[in-house]
Amino acid sequence: MNRPLAATLCTVLLLGTPLLATADVPEPTTGNFELVPIPQPSLDGMEDDVRQQIEGNRAAIDQLRRQSGAGVELGRALGELGALYLLYNLYEPAYAAFTNAAVLDPEQIRWPYLLAFVDKAEGRLDAAAAGFRRALALEPDHLVSLIGLGETRIAQGRPADAVEPLTRAVELRRTCAACHYGLGLAAVAQGDPRTAIEHFTETLRLQPAATAVHYPLGQAWRDVGDVERAQAELAEAGDGEVQKPDPILAWVRGLGTGASLHFARGRRALSAGQLDVAVAELRQATAADPENVAIRRALGLALRRSGDGEAAVGEYFEAMRLEPANPLNHQDLALALMDQGRPREAAVAFARAVDLDPGFADAHLGLGIALARLGRPREALPHLDRAVALAPENGDAVFERAMTLTTVGRGAEAVAALAALVEREPDRLMARLNLGTLLELAGETEAARRQLDAVLAADAPPEPAARAHLTLGRLDEEAGDRAAAERRYRQALALLPRLPPARLRLASVEAAKGDYLAAAANYAELLTAVPAHREARIAHSTCLLLTGRAADAAASLESGLSSLREDPYLQHQLAVVRATAPEAGVRDGDRAVELARAAYAAMPGPGTGQAVAMAYAEAGRFEEAVRAQERLLGTLPPGDEGRAGAEARLREYRAGRALREPWKEDPSLLYSPVVPLQLGN
């Protein structure tokens, strides 16, 4: 089948005929009831199996109409026809069919329930409430009708009237997450956040995948004044909706067949956050209609969201093969490639989308982002400029352009762009956060504080809140208030434990006040997350040395060199440890000579020169140690503050003595554990 599903759906939904001229009109067969006409939508364009199913059902109804006494049986057939129409979102003929089924089969709860379901879906809330009450008259303990009535009362703005049916539902089934969720919403609407918290919490206990509940739960915590709990819940908010047990709708879904049905089911599951269901349904839809691009794109999205990026890329490649001139296919492929950490390939796909549609703002934005990630900001900027020009209301484009402006030295323009974005969209917290950071870098500390304080005042999710605390801590540190800075860094890490810059700054503050054990622990935590962090590695080893743990310092530096091969800073630091550690088992003169000479070759200077001489001495090569130290002294002018120490070491080498722990007398031989403030982090 080559017909795109979008066109199929348009045919199903839009092609119709006058209601009375070509309607299925059942003959009245019971009492004095007059059955309503059922609109007969065109089946042209439907998949063959779907069309055959509906036509077969219509034929069975025609046969039953010719039989006397077939009232209940005819009612059930009409109800099944209505269910088929409902599957394909054909609400008008479905409603008429259910209306007739309720007349002919009055003891069956399905029909009043489905009528209420359609009324609720189309916003006829008074009729929906009446329908759920009719269903409950047939079966007072019908769980989903109780839930439906409660939900309808809330939607009507009558939350007090929702409590009774939802409470009855909870009494019937304590494990009903949808019941607790409805009671939580009713409590919110009645201004009772504490009761809402109880019910939302129970909802999530029963259905952890219902991540959408975290949002109203976070709002309720904020309403009772617990900002920390509110932030934690809001950070967990997602798309997963609360699922309720509904055997009647399960029966309706079980009637369906064909790619269109699986496509519709897949899209519903995708919007509800049921990713496993969405992938399974969309795979069935693809199997039924393998050349349908719309289905493949939907399957690609479901796979992306479920974390199977490689499979998503495959679906998008297939969609692109089927419709190579459709820029959306190239855009989708590019986004999936970005998810996979493949910006170079993504840039090619974004560029193709731009070639096909030069006015495609999102493709220009994606291409700009990809080029910026590739370290090509000057090439990225024209595309980001174009994205903003095409869609000036797109805050993401304005934001990405501003951040790219900073990398090409146009910080003032970046500040102006972010300031305008924040003024237009005050709730765009990442824009505020980065505006505060840029103002900090520009030395406008008070303006920076205002923006960062605004981020925190807005109950920001953990990441922007943590980064705001980090930047405020840097401002405190620059102002000389180390205690305030330390509090800020701890707040940042409480929100986002794996935020490397905050861990680095906290360790640096601890080391600066002489708490080397705590500093070493925090540097180690940072290195667990970022093993190749040179400054943290050097600072970690220095803190270990200052607490008498030379063996651990050497092990840390050797580990660092396994990922930062031939790094002269690490080579120098390790050479000093291998040459002068107090423990014989840590010292290794030959290794020290190898490391010290490599560091000196890469960055010659007094510090690395000292390390070469110390290494020779530890290796027992005192003549070379003396010559190295004499060369070093020849580079130091008279009066240099390091000259006296260098002369004392020369005397030791001439006497045939190596050195132990020279950094205790001259800390300049090691790098300081107080890592310099790095505002770019």
Image (spheres, rainbow, N blue to C red):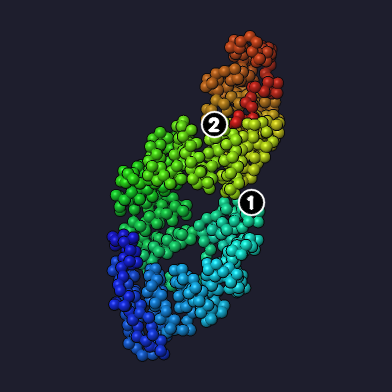
Residue at position x 62%, y 62% from top? 191
Front in this rendered view, residue 25 or 454: 454
> Whole-percent x and y of residue 42?
30, 71
Residue at position x 30%, y 72% from top? 17
> Whole-percent x and y of residue 119?
45, 72
Looking at the image, residue 283 sits to the left or right of residue 670; the answer is left
Front in this rendered view, residue 244 or 41: 41
- For mark 1, give the secondary structure: helix
> Whole-percent x and y of residue 608?
58, 20
At label 2, counting other C-alpha atoms closer than 10 Å, the crowd grade (few under 14, some 14-19, many 20 or more) is few
- Quarter-of-image position of residue 219: bottom right
Q: Are marks 1 and 2 in contact (CB under 8 Å)?
A: no
Residue tagged 2: 442
Residue tagged 1: 227
Mark found first going from the N terminus, 1 or 2: 1
**Would residue 498 be seen by someone viewing this image from the given angle?**
no
Whether 25 is drawn above or below 606: the answer is below
Residue at position x 32%, y 72% from top? 41
| CA distance separating discs 1 and 2 | 31 Å
**Would residue 509 be seen by someone viewing this image from the given angle?**
yes
> Whole-percent x and y of residue 287?
36, 61
Front in this rendered view, residue 464 or 346: 464
- Quarter-of-image position of residue 262: bottom left
Looking at the image, residue 514 sits to the left or right of residue 49; the answer is right
Whether 623 is drawn above or below 450: the answer is above
Residue at position x 40%, y 46% from top? 391
